[in-house]
């Protein structure tokens, strides 16, 4: 029978005390963060998961929620001076005006979607982006509410309380598994921008990675993997190294999607992939015929002569932009995403800015194989968050020298 010495007992006591102190500190930190959440933002952003119409409303419920967020924002003052970043406002106004004029004066095809409703959605998304960027809305509280809503969506789905349109693949209130996959992938990366503690970050990544997997969206799985990989590797690289990493991510995603897209649990996708290939072929023809200026809003669809009345949405957001608004619209959307969110030439990024950069990479990957990614709420969250962190970091940097000068001169 072994006996512990007094020194061993002392070491065990010290270890237990240290672990207890660490646990209390972590718990206190998390509770403090939760206590600082703003309830209006938390509740409103929770409602962004509801893509369908509810309560007899003529538009999706989350668009009504966006209106509520905007109305809340106008009651508050901006928290940052956007400075030269305000150039985004005229860019958005000009871009949406261009789309409106193009759609108004271009004859719509037979099965085109209602361009006025689509323009309304794009306009709300643009304003939503701007109120986020200005800090009128507490980003941390909003993202916490949206994350809670997404977890609720999964729970409701598996309890049979949310819609199931894809026979076992997680969709729920998002109504579409690819929309759900995109939302979970982008949020799973973007959340890391507002979380400080490492174990909480790991927990979020694991939970959202599992949720993305349950959607069965291969593109979204690749997008989240690339985003998380970027956060782990990019901080150790110079700018040129990040460009090379970006190229490797592109080549890797392309290689996997071409050669390994029907293995394992995805081995039964041959039929759906054939349909997707047919849609892609028809989409490419429509892109070629859209011309430099595009065909107007609501035209990012194809139909097949052998299936009268059929209407299939594009599976490529770059092509969708080209068909709806031509090269001017595509270059504007890509320019906003790259300049304001990706920031490929930036040499020094804070941890939140790095997470937003990774989320922008996830957005660009999702846009490659999903039909509507640009000018969605997820896209606006990424761009809005990027501008907020950028402006806030610059404002903090400008404040420090002033505070230092004041402090040095205070002791005469």
Image (spheres, rainbow, N blue to C red):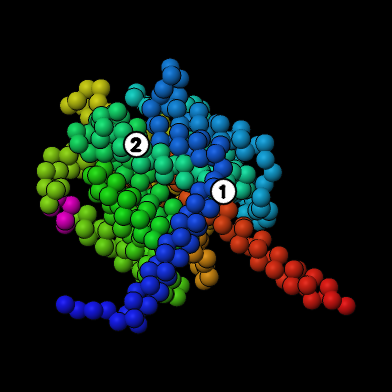
Q: Is residue 44 left or right of residue 249?
A: right
The answer to which quarter of the image holds residue 408 is: bottom right
Q: Is residue 25 left or right of residue 153?
A: right
- Local packing at callout 2 (Cα closer than 10 Å; few below 14, some 14-19, many 20+) is many
| Residue under pointer 2 | 153
- Local packing at callout 1 (Cα closer than 10 Å; few below 14, some 14-19, many 20+) is few
Looking at the rendered image, the quarter that the N terminus falls into is bottom left
**Mark 2, secondary structure of its residue:** helix
Residue at 51% in and 35% down: 44
**What residue range appears in magenta?**
259-263
Looking at the rendered image, the quarter that the C terminus falls into is bottom right
Residue 20: which numbered mark, if any? none
**Mark 1, secondary structure of its residue:** loop
The answer to which quarter of the image holds residue 163 is: top left
Label 1 to label 2: alpha-carbon separation = 24 Å
| Coordinates of residue 304 in the picture (x, y in percent) | 22, 30
Q: Taking the image as drawn, is residue 31 in sight?
A: yes
The answer to which quarter of the image holds residue 177 is: top left
Of residues 106 and 323, the one nearer the viewer is 323
| Residue under pointer 1 | 36
- Sequence order check, earlier mark of 1 and 2: 1
Task: Report the predominant secondary structure element of the magenta stretch.
Answer: loop
Of residues 86 and 161, the one nearer the viewer is 161
Residue at 14% in and 48% down: 265
| Coordinates of residue 178 in the picture (x, y in percent) | 30, 41
Instruction: From this view, report whether residue 359 is shown above or below residue 76.
Output: below
Instruction: From this view, report whether residue 363 is shown above or below residue 53.
Output: below
| Coordinates of residue 348 in the picture (x, y in percent) | 53, 70
Residue 26 belongs to the span the image colors magenta: no
Instruction: From this view, report whether residue 326 is shown above or below residue 240.
Output: above
């Amino acid at each position: 029978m072994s006996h512990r010495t007094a020194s061993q007992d002392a070491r065990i006591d010290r270890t237990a005390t240290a672990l207890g102190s660490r646990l209390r500190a972590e718990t206190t930190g998390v509770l403090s963060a939760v206590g600082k959440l703003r309830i209006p933002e938390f509740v409103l952003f929770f409602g962004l998961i509801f893509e369908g119409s509810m309560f007899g409303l003529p538009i999706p419920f989350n668009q009504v929620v966006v209106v509520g967020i905007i109305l809340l924002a106008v009651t508050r003052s901006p928290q940052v001076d956007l400075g030269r970043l305000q150039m985004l406002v005229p860019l958005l106004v000009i871009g949406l005006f261009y789309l409106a004029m193009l759609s108004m004066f271009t004859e719509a095809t037979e099965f085109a979607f209602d361009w006025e409703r689509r323009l309304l959605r794009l306009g709300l998304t643009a304003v939503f982006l701007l109120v986020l960027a200005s800090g009128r809305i507490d980003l941390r509280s909003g993202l916490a509410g949206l994350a809670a809503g997404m977890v609720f969506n999964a729970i409701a789905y598996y309890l049979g309380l949310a819609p199931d349109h894809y026979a076992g693949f997680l969709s729920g209130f998002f109504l579409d598994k690819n929309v759900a996959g995109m939302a979970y992938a982008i949020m799973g990366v973007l959340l890391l921008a507002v979380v400080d503690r490492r174990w909480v970050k790991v927990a979020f990544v694991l939970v959202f990675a599992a949720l993305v997997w349950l959607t069965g969206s291969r593109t979204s799985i690749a997008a989240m993997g690339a985003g998380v990989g970027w956060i782990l590797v990019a901080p150790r690289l110079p700018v040129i190294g990040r460009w090379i990493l970006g190229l490797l991510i592109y080549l890797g995603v392309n290689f996997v999607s071409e050669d390994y897209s029907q293995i394992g649990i995805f081995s039964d996708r041959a039929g759906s992939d054939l349909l997707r290939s047919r849609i892609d072929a028809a989409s490419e023809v429509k892109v070629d015929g859209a011309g430099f200026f595009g065909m107007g809003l609501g035209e990012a669809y194809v139909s097949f002569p052998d299936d009268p009345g059929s209407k299939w949405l594009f599976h490529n957001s770059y092509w969708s932009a080209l068909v709806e608004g031509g090269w001017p619209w595509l270059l504007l959307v890509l320019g906003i995403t790259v300049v304001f969110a990706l920031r490929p030439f930036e040499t020094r990024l804070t941890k939140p800015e790095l997470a937003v950069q990774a989320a922008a990479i996830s957005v660009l990957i999702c846009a490659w194989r999903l039909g509507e990614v640009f000018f969605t709420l997820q896209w606006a969250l990424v761009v809005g968050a990027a501008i907020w962190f950028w402006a806030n970091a610059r404002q903090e940097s400008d404040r420090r020298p002033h505070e230092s000068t004041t402090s040095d001169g205070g002791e005469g």
